[in-house]
Image (tube, rainbow, N blue to C red):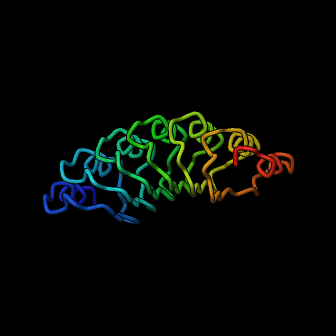
Amino acid sequence: MDEGVANLAGASYLRNLQKLYLDDNLLSPVACGSLGQSQYLSKIEHLSLAYNNIKKEGLMEIANSINFNKLIHLELESNEIEAEGVHAMAVSPHMVHLTYLNLKSNLVGNEGLFGLSIGIIKKLKYLNVQHNGIGEDGFRVIAESDNFTKLAELKIFDGNPGTTTEAKNALKRASTL
C-alpha cells in the first residue's frame, strides 16, 4: 500500500485537499515519508492514519514536514507509536496548530505524555491517550502542565495497575484543566 500512497502524494489534482483519511491500509513509515515530501498536499488540515503501522518513524516524518503546518486534527490510533515519536511531534513547529490528537492504543506511556507536556503544542482541545500504559506519573504530568489548559475532552484509561486514586484526583484538582 505504500506505493499507492506514493502515487497519491504525486497527484497534482489533490493540491486543494484539506482532509485525508488513510485508515487501516497497512501503511508503514515509508508512506508517511511520501506524504511529507509531496508537493501537492500542503493544505491538509485533517489527517487520519488510524490502524496502520507507521510507528515512531512515520510520526517523525509527518512532524518534520512543512506540508502539515496547517494540521489541526490528527488521528493516529493503533500505530505502535512510541514516546520518541510523540516527542518529535511535540517539538515540531509544523504541529503547533493541532487542536485534536488521537493517540489511542499506541505505546506512548508516561514518557510520551511528558514530551507533550513540555513541547510547543498548546492548543489541544481533545486528547485521547487511552490504552497507552499511562500510569500515575502520566496523570500528574497532565494535571501539572500548562500545555493542556485548552483541553475540553481528555480520554485516558485509568485501569492501569499502580495508578492511585491520588493521581486521578490530581487531574480533578488541576488548575490547568
Task: Choose top left, top right, bottom left or bottom right for residue 60.
Answer: top left
Residue at point 47% right, 34% down?
91
The answer to whether 129 appears left or right of 2 in the picture is right
Q: How many marks?
A: 0
Residue 116 locus on image (x, y percent): 57, 40
Residue 104 locus on image (x, y percent): 57, 57
Task: Choose top left, top right, bottom left or bottom right for residue 20.
Answer: bottom left
Name the quarter where the N terminus is drawn.
bottom left
Residue at point 38% right, 46% down?
58
Residue at point 21% right, 49% down?
38
Of residue 24 and residue 21, the one placed in the foreground of this image is 21
Residue at point 50% right, 51% down?
80
Residue 68 locus on image (x, y percent): 34, 47
The answer to whether 22 appears left or right of 105 in the picture is left
Task: Answer yes or no: is residue 55 visible.
Answer: yes
The answer to whether 33 appears left or right of 112 in the picture is left
Task: Answer yes or no: is residue 162 visible.
Answer: no
Of residue 139 and residue 56, the one placed in the foreground of this image is 139
